Image (cartoon, helix red, strand yellow):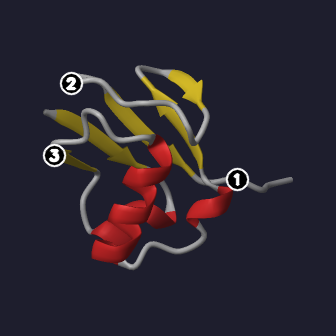
Amino acid sequence: MNKVLFFAHLRDAVGEESLTLKAAGKTVSDLKIELTAIYNLPKMDTVMTAINEEFASNDEVINDGDVIAFIPPVSGG
């Protein structure tokens, strides 16, 4: 099982801070596509992903027990 964390507008769209689901064997891109279809997530193509607190590319494969975080770009001043 994997814990998936959502930040900013993604948390609002999902309605939860985190989910626990089976993502092992999928790529980050696969998981983004799956979650977008279920939760209608906006702008996932611009979202940064971290696996176990280290930034990961869309082609990185998720292992059992990994913690995945989706972090939208932040603007401020």
Distance between the Cα atoms at labels 2 and 3?
Answer: 10 Å
Identify the residue at horizontal 25%, vertical 33% (top origin): 24
- Are the two marked residues, 1 and 2, in contact with CB atoms closer than 8 angstroms? no
> Residue 38: horizontal and vertical position, in percent?
28, 74
Amino acid tagged 2: Asp
Residue under label 2, please give it.
64
Q: Quadrant of residue 22?
A: top left
Point 69% across, 53% down: residue: 73
Give how far apart the Cα atoms at labels 3 and 1 are.
26 Å
Image position, residue 70 (x, y; %): 48, 46
User: Amino acid under label 3?
Assistant: Leu
| Circle on res. 74 | 1
Q: Nearer the viewer, residue 54 or 77?
A: 54
* Earlier sequence position, callout 3 versus callout 1: 3
* SS assignment at label 3: strand
- Image quadrant holding the N terminus, namely top left
Determine crowd level at label 2: few under 14, some 14-19, many 20+ residues with C-alpha closer than 10 A: few
Q: In the rendered view, would you say 51 is above or below 44?
A: above
Residue labelled with disc 3: 21
Using a 10 Å C-alpha cutoff, classify the residue at mark 3 as few (fewer than 14 neighbours), some (14 to 19) or many (20 or more).
few
Give whichever of discs 2 and 3 has the lower sequence position.
3
Q: Is residue 65 left or right of residue 33?
A: left
